[in-house]
Amino acid sequence: MESRNIGEGVKRGAWSKEEDILLKKCVQTYGQGRWHLVPLRAGLNRCRKSCRLRWINYLSPNIKRGYFTAEEVDLLIRLHRLLGNRWSLIAGRIPGRTANDVKNFWNTHMATKVSSSPKTSEPVEKNEIIKPKPHKLSKLAMSINKPFEEPQQKSQWCSNVLDTTETRKINGQNLFSIPRGLYSGGGTTEKSRAGNNSTTQKDVDNGVSEISMGFWKSLEFFNC
DNA sequence: AATCGAAACAACCGCCACCCT
DNA sequence: CAGGGTGGCGGTTGTTTCGAT
């Protein structure tokens, strides 16, 4: 694939290995953040967004690549029912997966499967989906995304947040029929990844009115 | 072996909230 | 308080890869 040069000479398209190395070095040296400075520091002819996206979705050492495990899919389905298309939130609860990963996976594997399932075609009631305004939600997510200390904590959360009957049906019907063997089936649970937990209670409170009570009940598991 | 359509995934775009001055 | 800059998000598009015929 050929990269294109559009506009003010900023390179677009696929990243080369050399660019990856430069970006990696830059982030390792200066840390994440201040993305507007990254192209300059790294000597990259890329826009800040492109650099950030490349790091977050591909170069970050926390990223888990490869097939989604059955456990991850199960969690994804439940979280999607709970949160809707809040990919960053969902990704925050699936260790090692990025929002882009989750979104791509859902769009290519789950969206059609779920919608084609007679039982699951039943639309999720709008008032059941948590839709705080984006950035309030982001902050809320940080509190929600407190890493699970223990594996049991995670499974407890999963089993209590949602009724699992539906997702089990989805899994039973579709999980192993997805082409290209995208599931490893079972798999291990990664240790929780480091979270950016800078949320204040005020931030969380700001979103209260926009969030269903069912969700807040689920948050009791985190003592939020 | 070649072709074509579908699936998978990397990357881009536009928007918006937050932060800082 | 207002305005500009920045970070981050979800939706969408473009390209590559895979599988069927």
Image: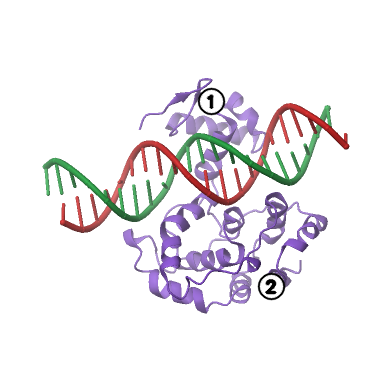
Chain colours: A purple, B green, C red
From this view, report whether residue A147 is shown above or below residue A167.
above
Name the secondary structure under disc 1.
loop
In the image, what residue occupies the spot 54% across and 46% down? A61
Figure quadrant of the C terminus of chain A: bottom right
Host chain of mark 1: A
Residue sitting at 70 percent across and 68 percent down?
Answer: A212
Q: Is residue A160 visible?
A: yes
Q: Quadrant of residue A39?
A: top right
**Residue A6 point in image, percent of width and height:** 48, 24
**Which subunit holds the residue at mark 2?**
A
Could you tell me which quadrant the N terminus of chain A lies in?
Answer: top left
Task: Say which of marks 2 and 1 sits in front.
Answer: 2
Q: Is residue A70 above or below residue A98?
A: below
**Disc 2 marks which residue?**
A214
Residue A199 figure quarter: bottom right
In x, y percent, where is residue A5?
45, 23
Judge whether residue A24 can be spotted in this image.
Answer: no
Q: Are discs 2 and 1 less than 8 Å apart at CB?
A: no
Relative to A62, does residue A75 appear above or below in the rendering?
below
Q: Amino acid at mark 2?
A: Gly
Query: Which amino acid does the dot numbered 1 rest on?
Result: Leu
On screen, residue A218 versus residue A113, left or right, reads right
Question: In the rendering, at what x and y percent does residue A129 appear?
Answer: 63, 65
